[in-house]
Image (cartoon, rainbow, N blue to C red):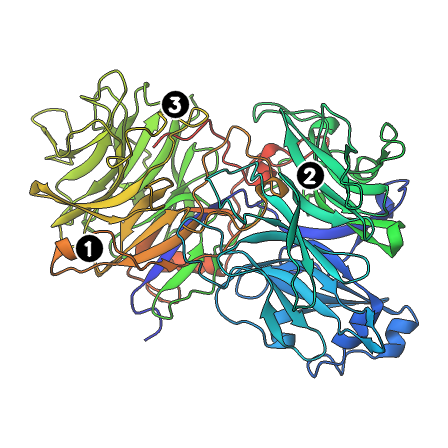
């Protein structure tokens, strides 16, 4: 039966709340009217490159496209082609082909046209190779791209590998060597060579901004692959000629774009120091389009033009005379990942469709249903943080991006049931597991700092809308509550007894109605110099699952840039015998990394987590910058457990990757109801839009930080 094990819901960070789309403008532009919309406007579209005319002629001969166009359309200029990522196919991030006619645009899934892959995966960085002559033979054109379809042998390594699909025959083959992860492939002008940013020889070390990949070059056609490293510490390669590669690299506090001469081995910085310049797209062997941020900013600031991400042209022969592009067309909006059209006469990019909004406008959002790798489990993304379902599946609650309001969706519709206008933040709502008790528990406090007080509060009679709260804790930093199945007790993590280092352990409120007040008592469940957190009671009531650093190596760093250094694994503890503890799943073999926010399936046979088990899937700097925001975790995974013998769950080897995304998916939850169940009224939001109002646009039309998809809070604290 479809979705007979219920549905998993999660939240995505760094994903803009307004769809991205692809645009271009002439070089140089004169005003906003010069900007041209390049797609059909459906879904979210980004990371685009052009399809050369000869390759396009091959593509339109495919059976699924043969009735759409012919070679004469290409030769006359009536038809051009693009390859880009779109989320229109089951909300997966996969490659699509745009046929751009002079009067319309039609978009097709690349995998549908070529019959490549149908499984859950992410695709990126489509680029056309081939088309060159070897003797009397012309090498077929092919699409070179990244896919995450292959599971690597090692945990905590990127699943990204470069593949090639022959555009004539449809033959698809892997170019990245086994055991290696590659990003950002770029094909040389002749179609013979591919440059990639690679983790070869080093692997991923947990870095979430500056990956410090090396750049390798290999042949489009193999054998021989002739793969070799040419640049150490570089990313996002792009060919200016067969001999010139531009790339980005972080030096000190700033990112810069550099020009590498393969023949001489000389590397020259093209962009000026003191600004961030990233994601280059070469126009010629001296000229390159880049995204710049000329002035750093904070969430608390109303950004000025120089603090937005803009597209500019730099010339290595005159680096102090850049040509501004998007500052002319849309000065107060972020623009990403430029690409080159018409031989450099036009420059393309993607941005949010924020021009459709006005100051104070409410942004319509859907809950997005995704293609699930398990037919018996539904999957959808919630436009809110910390989604939580009531046990009977009738109510869904979450908090907004600013952690100021709690929203509930039920038979009465969608509405705010509690909010704070003071300095306090609200997060981690969770329903009492007894369906008869209409109670939400939330965490409230002025800061996510472990040294500050964070309280657990109950919001009783949620559905009535009275918006009252009742404190359950006194002092200390308390968070992540979860009730027993009967709703009488509550497990949570706290810094009480944690000493100067604010160690966090698990505690049980023996009476969830009164907490620490009145005759309420608190029982300590775990005891150690570590962080035990993200706890949840099992449906049977026998076990509590939680995330912990208790097995962190002695020589592990205390913090990483002020954040926890990772080393989180997931454990099970017996609720009535805390001496029985089993480590279920770890991230890296050295226990580094994050496996967090565990949550039981309704039948208790699986646990869903958010983790960096698959490392990163794109170069993070190509996304909105990670400034003053939460530590990203990665994707959503599940692990199946043995419910008969808990000891058989030690370090489970097999896990299932549920989501494949460039964004950060986190805080998963699992409900017994399916995404199509008529009794779960929250699922209407999968079809009907709701419109929470947020300050996404300033009065002058500028985009606020919210448009980047960031959580607008200080640093994360587990």
Looking at the image, can residue 349 be seen?
no
The residue indicated by pointer 3 is 447
Query: Which mark's residue is nearer the viewer, 1 or 2?
Result: 2
Q: Where is residue 2 in the image (x, y as percent from the top left)?
A: 35, 73
Circle 2 residue: 248
Q: Is residue 53 visible?
A: yes
Report if the CB atoms under discs 2 and 3 are less than 8 Å apart: no
Q: Is mark 3 on a helix, strand or loop?
A: loop
Q: Which of marks 1 and 2 is nearer the N terminus?
A: 2
Location of mark 1 (residue): 649
Front residue (pair 459, 713): 713
- Extreme residue toward the right, this view: 76
Q: Which residue is drawn at 57% across and 27% down?
A: 299
Q: Nearer the viewer, mark 2 or mark 3?
A: 2
Give the percent coordinates (x, y) of residue 8. Answer: 36, 57
301 over 344 or under it: above or below: above
Q: Is residue 294 above or below residue 38?
A: above
């Amino acid at each position: 039966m479809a979705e007979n094990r219920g549905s998993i819901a999660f939240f995505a960070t760094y994903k803009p709340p307004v769809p991205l789309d692809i645009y271009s403008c002439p070089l140089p532009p004169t005003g906003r009217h010069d900007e041209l919309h390049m797609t059909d406007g459906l879904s979210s579209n980004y990371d685009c490159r052009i399809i050369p005319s000869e390759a396009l002629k091959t593509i339109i001969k495919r059976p699924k496209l043969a009735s759409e166009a012919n070679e004469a359309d290409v030769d006359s200029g009536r038809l051009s082609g693009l390859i880009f990522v779109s989320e229109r196919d089951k909300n997966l991030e996969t490659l699509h082909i745009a046929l751009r006619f002079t009067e319309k645009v039609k978009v097709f899934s690349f995998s549908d046209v070529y019959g490549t892959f149908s499984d859950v995966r992410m695709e990126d960085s489509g680029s056309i190779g081939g088309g060159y002559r070897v003797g009397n033979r012309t090498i077929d054109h092919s699409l070179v791209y990244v896919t995450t379809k292959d599971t690597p042998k090692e945990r905590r390594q990127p699943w990204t590998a470069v593949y090639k699909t022959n555009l004539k025959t449809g033959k698809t083959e892997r170019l990245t060597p086994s055991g290696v992860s590659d990003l950002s492939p770029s094909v040389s002008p002749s179609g013979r060579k591919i440059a990639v940013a690679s983790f070869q020889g080093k692997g991923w070390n947990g870095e979430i901004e500056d990956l410090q990949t090396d750049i390798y070059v290999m042949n489009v056609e193999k054998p021989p692959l002739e793969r070799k490293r040419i640049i150490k510490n570089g990313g996002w390669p792009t060919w200016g000629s067969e001999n010139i590669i531009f790339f980005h690299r972080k030096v000190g506090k700033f990112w810069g774009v550099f020009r590498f001469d393969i023949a001489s081995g000389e590397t020259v910085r093209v962009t000026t120091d003191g600004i961030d310049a990233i994601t280059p797209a070469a126009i010629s062997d001296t000229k390159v389009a880049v995204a710049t941020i000329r002035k750093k900013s904070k969430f608390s600031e109303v950004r000025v033009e120089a603090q937005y991400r803009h597209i500019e042209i730099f010339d290595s022969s005159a680096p102090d005379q850049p040509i501004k592009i998007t500052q002319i067309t849309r000065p107060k909006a972020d623009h990403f990942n430029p690409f080159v059209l018409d031989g450099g006469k036009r420059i393309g990019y993607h941005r949010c469709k924020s021009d459709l909004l006005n100051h104070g406008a409410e942004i319509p959002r859907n809950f997005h249903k995704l293609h699930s790798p398990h037919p018996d489990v539904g999957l959808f993304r919630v436009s809110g943080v910390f989604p939580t379902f009531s046990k009977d599946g009738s109510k869904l609650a979450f908090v907004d991006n600013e952690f100021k309001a709690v929203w509930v969706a039920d038979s009465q519709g969608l509405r705010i049931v509690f909010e704070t206008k003071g300095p306090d933040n609200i997060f981690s709502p969770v329903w009492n597991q007894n369906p008869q008790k209409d109670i939400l528990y939330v965490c409230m406090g002025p800061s996510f700092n472990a040294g500050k007080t964070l309280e657990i509060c109950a919001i009783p009679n949620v559905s009535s809308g009275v918006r009252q709260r009742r404190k359950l804790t006194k002092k200390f930093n308390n968070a992540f509550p979860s009730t027993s199945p009967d709703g009488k007790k509550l497990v949570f993590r706290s810094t009480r007894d944690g000493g100067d280092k604010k160690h966090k352990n698990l505690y049980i409120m023996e009476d969830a109605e009164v907490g620490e007040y009145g005759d309420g008592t608190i029982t300590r469940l775990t005891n150690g110099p570590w962080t035990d957190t993200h706890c949840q009671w099992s449906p049977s009531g026998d076990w509590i699952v939680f995330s912990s650093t208790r097995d962190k190596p002695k020589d592990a760093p205390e913090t990483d840039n002020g954040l926890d250094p990772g080393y989180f694994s997931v454990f099970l503890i017996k609720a009535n015998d805390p001496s029985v503890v089993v480590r279920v799943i770890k991230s890296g073999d050295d226990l580094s990394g994050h496996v967090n926010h565990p949550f039981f399936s309704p039948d208790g046979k699986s646990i869903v987590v958010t983790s960096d088990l698959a490392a990163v899937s794109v170069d993070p700097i190509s996304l909105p910058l990670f400034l003053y925001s939460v530590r990203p975790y990665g994707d959503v995974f599940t692990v199946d457990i043995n419910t008969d013998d808990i000891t058989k769950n030690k370090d489970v080897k097999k896990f299932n990757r549920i989501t494949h995304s460039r964004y950060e998916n986190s805080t998963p939850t699992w409900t017994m109801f399916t995404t199509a169940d008529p009794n779960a009224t929250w699922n209407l939001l999968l079809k009907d839009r709701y419109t929470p109002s947020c300050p996404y646009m300033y009065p002058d039309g500028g985009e606020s930080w919210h448009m980047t998809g960031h959580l607008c809070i200080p640093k994360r604290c587990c």
